[in-house]
Structure formats: structure tokens, C-alpha cells
Image: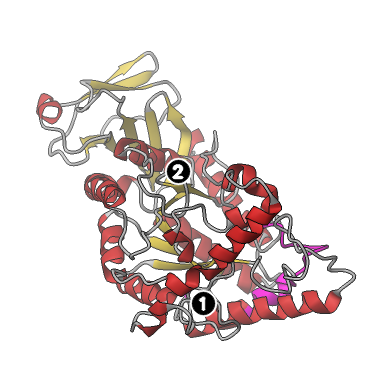
Amino acid sequence: MLSSTKILVICFGLASLVMASRLSASEAPEADAQLARRIEWFRDRKFGFFMHWGAYSQLGCIESWPLVWADRKWSNPSLRTFDEMLAFRKKYWALNATFNPTKFDPQSWAKIAENAGMRYVMFTTKHHDGFCMYDTKQTDYKVTGSDCPWSKSPKADVARAVFDAFRQQGFGIGAYFSKADWHHPGYWDPQRPAIDRNPNYDTSKEPQRWEDFVKFTHAQIEELMSNYGRIDILWLDAGQVRPPKQDIRMDELAAMARQHQPHLIIVDRTAGTKHENYRTPEQEVPDRPLSYPWETCMTMGDQWSFKPNDNYKSTRRLVQLLVDIVAKGGNFLLNVGPQPDGDLPPEAVKRLQEIGKWMAVNGEAIYATRPIAPYKTGRVCFTSKGDTVYAIYLAEDSRNAPPASIALPRGAPRPKAGSEVHLLGFDGAMKWTEADGGVVIQLPEAAIKNPPCEHAWVVKITP
């Protein structure tokens, strides 16, 4: 008979498969089965690298959103009048003419991310501002456009260079693409005031203008799907672009994308449709496991794009966020905004290096694991891989060495007679005793004096 914890894990896995099937782009059983397999591939990866990068990095401002008058209180609070907004837009739209990231080295990015223990990448091919970081043929407002000084570089097609570099390191490849485009006249008509993030005209009364934008969007995505090698995830942002007023014909778009990339995972985020193959809580970690595939996307600093002297989360905080997310069945997509010169910010690189040291010791408790009840109790999180359970103790802020003992309460996964109990990164089995319906695991004094890592310690329980 299966234990209650094993039953919960199986139920969670079945729920994930059902969710993947329900959200698929096709009702065909073969397509649903393939998508379910791809979702499991995605869940095995666990830790991803997100990069918001575009011409906006030169201003050190929030990406795209300062262009929106209705959102100025949080994105561009210095603006007082709409005339000031128009002047800012003129300055912003001209950033392509000065974008010249001479230190751009995608191979170094990929190596840094690999050493951090990351397994997939998500790159902003086009944000809401419409500036394309790839060689689209649909607009001249792009990094390879003649107005952009970087267009003369052999690495001018930034998205291609990023995807190639990360693919060479075995990463899954994700293409972020905004369905909105505030630079395109079919979304924001330049002859009319644009007040909020939506089209500044009635799409039902001007269907041809909207149709022009839909065709433009499909053509841009087809370029990404057909000209940039294997793409594993198409991550669509701007959830307001959905029926009835902003219908971009997602069924047709998804079918076209999968003609070129049959294995593709599509994330039509926040749209709530069958094309939202997994969900993406933003800047937050759910309180409990979710019944569908998910990924927390979160900034290392305060904002998605580069910000001078940004306030980066501590390495301890980042490691413990990763553990908490994975214990609840999610993936962690961690964002860093590259500098305008193409380098990653040194402080962010330092954090990634420190995370990598922890992952080098404890990665087996993260990759390809699944959640197991009670997921988290006190300072201990749980993950599982087959019959093996990992109990991960999250260090208090003041603690630099593991505690003398770790208590697993009643109802938590626990060793049984014959089980082997080890601390990852430390040789030798550990003793444990029963107490109050649970168990107490004793850590060796040598491991306390010379800890195998910082921030969190992993006890591996093998039947």
C-alpha cells in the first residue's frame, strides 16, 4: 500500500499532466501527450535565467512602462503633464540610435548561468516598447536596424547570439515576446493620444488597422519560430492582448508556431486560455503547492531592467527562495538586467557565483524532484525523487553552520528501519531517533565545524 505522502505526490503529478493537457493548443491525444511530456521536461529544469535587455537599459529606467501615461505614478513619477510625457517618449523612442553594447559576450553570460546551476534561459526578444532584439524583417525599429550603431557588429542579432550561446551549454531556450507593441501604429496610432497600455482606438470600429497589427505580430513570431533554431518555450507577455477587443487569433498563432516547433511550450501568460501551458506568478511565491505547472518569475534586484546601484537580494535569500519554490512544485526564473554596455552587473554575477557553490553541493535535491507533503514545516522544506526524500533546512539569518540536530515532526517524510541518512556534501551516515511521533536527526560535529555549504543544508533519506 502507498503511503499518504506518496499518494499526494502521484496526485500532484497527475494534476499537472491533466492541466497540461487541458491547456494544450490541440485536442488531439498525441499532441496532448507530447505537451505533457514537455511540461515534465520543463519541471525537471527547475532553475532558469531571465534577462530583460533592450535600448531602455541606457536610461537605467523601468523597461517600457515609463511610456504609459496611466502608469506614470509607479513607472515615471517625475512626469507632471502630458506634454512632458510626449517629450519623454520622443527621447525614449530614439534610444535605438545610441544602443551600442560593445562588451556584449553571450558566451560569458551562458557560462555564468551554467555555473550558477541554471538549466534554461528566457530572453526578451521584444518588450512592449516594440524595439526588437532580433533581426525581424517586419520593422526597422530593431537592434539590426541601420539607425542602431550595434547593427555593424557581427553579434548584431542579439537574440540569435544569446540563443546560440546558451544552446551550446545545454540550456532550454525560451523566447519572451510582448504581444503588445506601443511603437506600432496598429497598436498605438501616432496621430492620437495614447493614455494607457491598450490600443488608442476602437479595434471593432477600425478592423483593418487591427488586422494589420495581428498580421505583423504573427509574422514576427513566425520569424522567431523558423529562423532561430530550436525554441523550447514561447513566453508571451501583455495579458491584456486577448479577446474580445484585442483578439490576435491565438489558436492560429499557436498552430503556426508548432508547425515550426512541434515540441513548443506556449505561455500565453495571464490570459487564462488553453495556450497558457504553465502559469507564471510574478514577484511572489505561492503559499502552498499549486495544482498546475508553474514558475515564479522574480527579479534579483528591484526592477526587471538594469538599474544603477540596484538593491539585490542576498544570496541566502535567493537560495532559500529557490528551495521554497521547488518544494512547492514550481520552477524559479530569476531575472538579471544586463548593463547598457553588455556586461552583467558585477554584484549580480557575484550572487550567481555564490548560488552556484550551493548548487554544486545540493543540486540533486533540486533538479528533477517533485513535491512531497507537507512540503514545508518550520524551517525544513521537502523534495523527493522516486523513493528518496530530501529534507532541506533553511538557515536563520545569523546561522553559518548547520544545527546539531534537525527535527522532522509527525506526518513529515522520515527514515525507517534500514534507511540511509546522509548530509549532502559530507561523507558518512547520520544517526536518528524517534521522538514525539517524528524523528530527530543528529548531525556530525565535523559537519558543524566544517559545513559543506552555506544558506541551507540538505539531509538525504534513502530507503
Where on the picture, by quarter, is residue 173?
A: bottom left
| Three-letter code for the amino acid on which mark 2 is drawn | Asp
Q: Name the residue furthest top.
A: 436
Q: Name the residue furthest right.
A: 205
Q: Which residue is mark 2?
A: 302
Note whether residue 270 is visible. no
Q: Is residue 308 left or right of residue 37?
A: left
Disc sitting over residue 404 in the figure: none
Q: Residue at x 24, y 21 (%)?
A: 405
Q: In the figure, 146 relative to 336: above or below?
A: below
Q: Is residue 304 left or right of residue 345?
A: right
Of mark 1 and mark 2, the one earlier in the sequence is 1
Q: Residue at x 43, y 74 (%)?
A: 159
Q: In the figure, 135 relative to 382: above or below?
A: below
| Three-letter code for the amino acid on which mark 1 is drawn | Lys
Tell me if residue 104 is in the magenta stretch: no
Q: In the figure, 18 relative to 329: above or below?
A: below
Between residue 156 and residue 121, name the one nearer to us. Answer: 156
Q: In the figure, 148 relative to 359: above or below?
A: below
Disc sitting over residue 142 in the figure: 1
Q: Which element type, helix, strand or loop, lies under badge 1? A: loop
Between residue 433 and residue 187, name the one nearer to us. Answer: 187
Between residue 385 and residue 234, name the one nearer to us. Answer: 234
The quarter of the rendered structure image containing the C terminus is: top left
Which portion, as a residue range, is magenta?
231-256
What colouring style does the render use? secondary structure
